[in-house]
Image: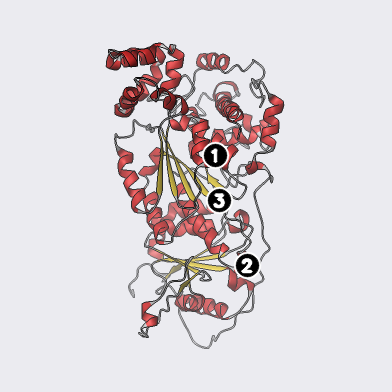
Amino acid sequence: MSSVHLKTIEQRLLWLSHWMIHNANHIRPKVDGIKVGGHQASSASMVSIMTALYFSVLRPEDRVAVKPHASPVFHAMHYLMGTQTREKMEAFRGYGGVQSYPSRTKDTDDADFSTGSVGLGVGITALASIVQDFIKAKEWGADTRLGRMVALVGDAEMDEGNVYEVLQEGWKNDLRNTWWIIDYNRQSLDGIVREGLFERIDRIFDAFGWDVVKIKYGILQRAAFDEPGGEKLRSWIDACPNAEYAALTYMGGEVWRKRLMDDLGDQGDVTALLDKRSDAELADLMENLGGNCVQTMAETFAAIDHDRPTCFLAYTIKGWGTPIAGHKDNHGGLMTRAQMADWQKHMAVPEGQEWDPFAAVDDEAGLKSFLAEVPFFGKGTRRHSDEKLPVPGIAFSTDREISTQAAFGKILDELSKGQSDLAARIMTTSPDVTGTTGLGAFVNRRKLFARQAQRDAFIEHRIPSTAKWNFAPEGQHVELGIAEMNLFLLLGAAGLAHSLWGKRIIPIGTVYDPFVHRGLDALNYACYQDARFMIVGTPSGVTLAPE
């Protein structure tokens, strides 16, 4: 890992993502004056995190759900790697151009999971990890290389309720190989994230068995803290309210100096620490939070040597590195033409070379050599495929009238008795209504899935029961809690198994049909990704009652 090359990549992605947005709003011809948008500030806060992640730690088997508003950085990254075209970049948010939010079905630059409806891209990574374990435990999937399922999360996404439903489901299913990296810029569309929020979220993650890694200070700040007066500066940073820190960032080094001198400057060691830095250097120091320091992020990722689910809380500045950094209106704001012109000079990008992937790069040959060896991109496209499965004959008595629900259960039961490839690849799932939606016979024969076999006290004590709930690695039923959002996210992940892991699964989910609407957002999300699955609603009526 070369920190010099990572820093160069970071700056290239920062520029290219912002230029793409600027081009769409201020240069590209349009028939109306409507803003195209593109979230420059939300992209800027993610650029160091994404650079460290993709170019220093990820492997081809890892899968990422990119924060929706970091889509421009994702496209810029593939443009730098030569896997995205300038034509599509110039058409950003236009017909045929790269998408506002990463899309498996519309983008051509290898998005692992579509994102857009906030919170769902976060949740699907945990459920995809469960699917990955399901595949790995089977004879037909034993050669699967386990990867990390990674979500890049906007801090405001943590307001979404389905995120917490997924945490509970992960705990019940012994979740592993899952990283959630939170861009903690403490600004949302309408304002500033409430003080102390993450102290509470931290405890929630801990309760469900996650490791929490807080990344608050960058390399410049940590070095300053080691100087005389550094601990006082650190204490001041820790005590500064989110909104105040954002406002000071926007106003810049001169205002930083005045405020710090007013608060701390009567102490000789702190005054000396500040005086040895110019206004620009002081601004760089105060904005050098952990999530905006590519070297710190790379070192943090590299230090993880286990498969426990891990949440990274990366402190960032929204709009970092740009003229609109820290401003409370920057979520949907854009740099003006004048700001972009000044920033272009600051970024040392010559006029006419705005689209050049390697503009302002001193060691182009060295950087290209480094990029050619980045593991994540080493095997080209990461879309897999698998053969279609032949459907065996299914025969059972039709000499009496039965309900559709019973017929569904009998069809699955007949399949479960055979040894067909199709039967082996079926994965059933249900939100706590397995026995009452026709899955009971299949589950009794094919067992419930768990990475470790679990004892059934009723079987051991020979207590009669129609439900033989054997949990084992070879099990083919994933039992969920009563959360229809999780049901559809799991079906979505399993329905992409042929593409993500090269192992086709036939996912079948059952639900009481009046409750389908409780998971419609996740159902729509799964279909948008072109996931392949069956959803069976019972009792196929208006209510659960006989009428």
Tell me residue 199's x, y (percent): 31, 41
Element assignment for label 3: loop
Q: Is residue 227 at all visible to an observer of this figure? A: yes
Assess disc 3: are there few (<14), some (14-19) or many (≥20) residues with their C-alpha within 10 Å of its C-alpha: many
Q: Residue 238 or 418: which is nearer the viewer?
A: 238
Residue 140 circle label: 2
Q: Residue 279 or 477: which is nearer the viewer?
A: 279
CA–CA distance between discs 3 and 1? 24 Å
Name the residue located 34 percent from the left edge and 22 percent from the top edge.
233
Element assignment for label 2: helix
Q: Residue 293 or 170: which is nearer the viewer?
A: 293
Q: Locate the N terminus by quadrant.
A: top right
Q: Is residue 382 above or below residue 345?
A: below
For marks 2 and 1 on the same chain, the one whose residue lies earlier in the sequence: 1
Tell me residue 109's x, y (percent): 63, 41
Residue 350 circle label: none
Assess disc 1: are there few (<14), some (14-19) or many (≥20) residues with their C-alpha within 10 Å of its C-alpha: many
Residue beneath disc 1:
53
Amino acid carrying mark 2 in the image: Trp
For marks 3 and 1 on the same chain, the one whose residue lies earlier in the sequence: 1
CB under 8 Å between discs 2 and 1 = no
Q: Which quadrant would residue 99 be assigned to in this image?
A: top right
Picture colour scheme: secondary structure
Name the residue located 33 percent from the left edge and 15 percent from the top edge.
269
Residue beneath disc 3:
529
Q: Residue 281 or 249: which is nearer the viewer?
A: 281
Amino acid carrying mark 1 in the image: Leu
Name the residue located 67 percent from the left edge and 31 percent from the top edge.
87
Tell me residue 112's x, y (percent): 57, 47
Amino acid carrying mark 3 in the image: Gln
Q: Is residue 536 at all visible to an observer of this figure? A: no
